[in-house]
Image (cartoon, helix red, strand yellow):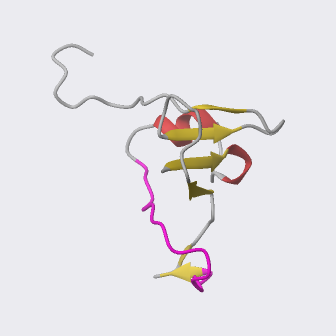
Amino acid sequence: MEALLISSKVPVARNADLDLALHGGEDYELLFTAPQKTKIPAQIAGVPVTEIGEIRNRGDYSSAIQIMDDNGKVRPLPQRGWEHFKKSH
C-alpha cells in the first residue's frame, strides 16, 4: 500500500508554503485514514476535516508516500523534518 497526497488539498497556513506545511515544525494536525464509503463529519471537535489524498495499492514507486502536484505529476515525498536526537542542527 502507498499513500498518495494531493498537493492542492493539503491545508497551508497563512504566510506558509506547501514545503513548510509538509515538513515544518511545531504546528500539526492529526492524520487518519478511513474506508472509502465511511461518512466523515465536516468537523471533529470544531476542527475542519480535510481529505488530502488516498491509500492505494502500491505502484512501481520507490517510496510508500507519494505526492501529486498541480500538473498531475506524481513523485516520492521526501522524508524530512526535525530530528530530535541529532547532535548538531
Q: Is residue 39 magenta?
A: yes
Image height of 8 relative to 37, above or below: above
Quadrant the C terminus occupies: top left
Where is residue 72 drawn, in percent x and y? Answer: 80, 39
The structure residue drawn at horizontal position 38% and vertical position 31%, both measured from the top left corner, is 81
The structure residue drawn at horizontal position 46% and vertical position 82%, both measured from the top left corner, is 45
In this rendering, does residue 45 appear at all?
yes
Q: Is residue 61 magenta?
A: no
Instruction: Determine the image quadrant of residue 38.
Output: bottom right
Of residues 68 and 12, which is closer to you in this image?
68
Image height of 46 relative to 51, above or below: below
Of residues 28 and 73, which is closer to you in this image?
73
Which contiguous range is marked in magenta? 27-42
Image height of 5 relative to 32, above or below: above
The structure residue drawn at horizontal position 48% and vertical position 51%, both measured from the top left corner, is 1
Where is residue 5 drawn, in percent x and y? Answer: 61, 48
